[in-house]
């Protein structure tokens, strides 16, 4: 599993927010019933997730660049690229078979971020991921949730958006897949056949999925892979052509399910380095068009504490802490 924390240190006001659901459980249902049967959410209904609070603000005004209305809708006043991080914790209190839960982050009612997962147990579950999104000025940002069964969304859920840079003032790309299948077997397969929604500097190969680093610096890499009808052992590999392939994700899933694989990391690279993702799925699957892949240049190799970004990432698989320059600083 890979997760990370993104933070920006400035002497001027930050552009972003971090909020949590207020301290109660929010039940999401669309059909009331007098029976003791599980309350099923309609397959064509999504619920707006509300109750977001920032402990440092009680007036609905967050850090510069965002305002909130009805504890559910965030208004971005500054256009540009944003790093988005979402963690939704929920419980399914009623026993039953498989159920599906989906999360969608929208800007002006257009889906920007998407998570989908099938589960076969009750207890507490977590859906999380990280994305890079392009937000237009005055865009209204919301989080919607869908579930095929009655669930309680817990107050420890969190939602974060952080301004990265004005578009198009950063080299990089933002892509979604066209028709993309993962063949069954243990052989590593390149993620190919992409559609580039943003490609500043013509740095991304849509046919091969390779990214050639244009200039020396720090890069924010985000892959949100949504697999459909996938089963068996699943692994995601990452390489920079100078080092051996690192396995960033590995798990086992049940047959023919929807599975979201979230990966985000910040590392320094030198120009002409080729960055590549590969994937294996034991019994094969299909990569959903709602998947997202992005790499953006965020800072030069000369760090300036007055305006540069500070990154702090936890790699739970290798038990390493990576800080600032991407170098190993300690184990935990």
Image (spheres, rainbow, N blue to C red):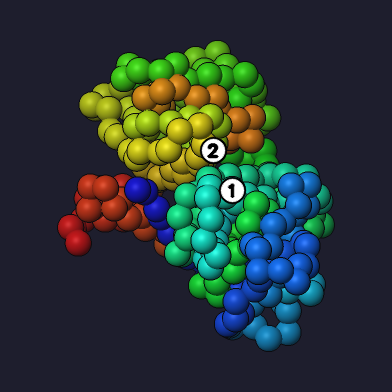
Q: Which mark is residue 100?
A: 1
Residue 58 in which image quadrant? bottom right
SS type, badge 2:
strand
- Residue 256 is situated, as x and y percent measured from the top left of the image, at 51, 32
Q: Looking at this view, is 59 or 98 the one in front?
A: 98
Q: Is residue 234 above or below residue 27?
A: above
* Location of residue 90 in the rendering, given as x and y in whole percent from the top left corner: 54, 65
Q: Is residue 182 above or below residue 171?
A: above
Left or right: 177 as drawn, with respect to 274: right
* Residue at 60%, 25% in the rendered image: 177
Residue beneath the point at 74% across and 47% down: 43
Q: Is residue 231 above or below residue 67?
A: above
- The extreme left residue here reads 331
The C terminus appears in which quarter of the rendering? bottom left
82 sits to left or right of 324: right
Up the image or down, 24 lies above or below 7; here it is below
Label for residue 75?
A: none
The 10 Å Cα crowd at callout 1, few under 14, some 14 to 19, many 20 or more, is some
Where does the image place residue 12, in percent across and percent down from the top left?
Answer: 58, 69
Residue extending farthest to the bottom is 58
Give the class, few, some or many, for how many residues have Cα within 10 Å of label 2's Cα (few <14, many ≥20).
many
Q: Along the polypeptide, which appears first: circle 2 or circle 1?
A: 1
On the picture, is 200 further left or further right than 322?
right
Task: State the mark number for residue 258.
Answer: 2
Report if residue 90 is visible in the image.
Answer: no
At x 49%, y 15%, the residue is 208
> What separation in Å lies between label 2 and label 1 (alpha carbons)?
8 Å
Circles 2 and 1, Cβ within 8 Å, touching? The answer is yes
Residue beneath the point at 65% across and 63% down: 37
| Percent coordinates x, y for residue 131 in the rendering | 56, 46
């Amino acid at each position: 599993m890979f997760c990370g924390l993104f933070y920006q240190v400035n002497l001027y006001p930050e552009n972003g927010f971090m909020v949590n659901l207020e301290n109660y459980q929010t039940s999401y249902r669309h059909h009331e019933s007098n029976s003791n049967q599980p309350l099923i959410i309609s397959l064509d209904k999504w619920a707006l997730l509300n109750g977001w609070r920032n402990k440092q603000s009680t007036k609905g005004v967050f850090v510069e660049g965002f305002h909130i209305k009805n504890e559910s809708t965030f208004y971005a006043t500054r256009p540009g690229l944003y790093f988005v991080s979402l963690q939704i914790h929920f419980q399914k209190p009623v026993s039953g078979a498989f159920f599906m839960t989906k999360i969608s982050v929208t800007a002006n009612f257009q889906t920007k971020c998407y998570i989908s997962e099938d589960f076969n147990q009750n207890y507490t579950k977590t859906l999380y991921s990280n994305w890079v999104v392009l937000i237009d000025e005055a865009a209204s940002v919301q989080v919607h949730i869908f579930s095929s069964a009655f669930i309680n969304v817990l107050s420890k859920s969190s939602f974060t958006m952080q301004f990265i840079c004005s578009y198009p003032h950063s080299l990089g790309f933002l892509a979604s897949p066209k028709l993309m299948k993962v063949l069954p077997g243990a052989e590593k397969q390149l993620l190919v056949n992409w559609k580039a929604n943003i490609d500043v500097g013509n740095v991304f190969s849509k046919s091969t999925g390779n990214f050639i680093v244009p200039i020396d610096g720090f890069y924010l890499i985000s892959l949100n892979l949504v697999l459909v009808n996938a089963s068996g052992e699943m692994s995601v590999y990452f390489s920079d052509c100078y080092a051996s392939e690192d396995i960033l994700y590995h798990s086992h899933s049940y047959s023919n399910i929807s599975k979201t694989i979230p990966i985000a990391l910040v590392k320094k690279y030198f120009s002409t380095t080729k960055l590549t993702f590969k994937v294996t799925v034991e019994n094969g699957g299909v990569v959903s068009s709602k998947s997202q892949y992005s790499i953006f240049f965020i800072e030069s190799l000369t760090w300036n504490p007055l305006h540069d970004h500070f990154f702090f990432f936890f790699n739970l698989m290798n038990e390493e802490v990576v800080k600032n320059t991407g170098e190993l600083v300690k184990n935990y």
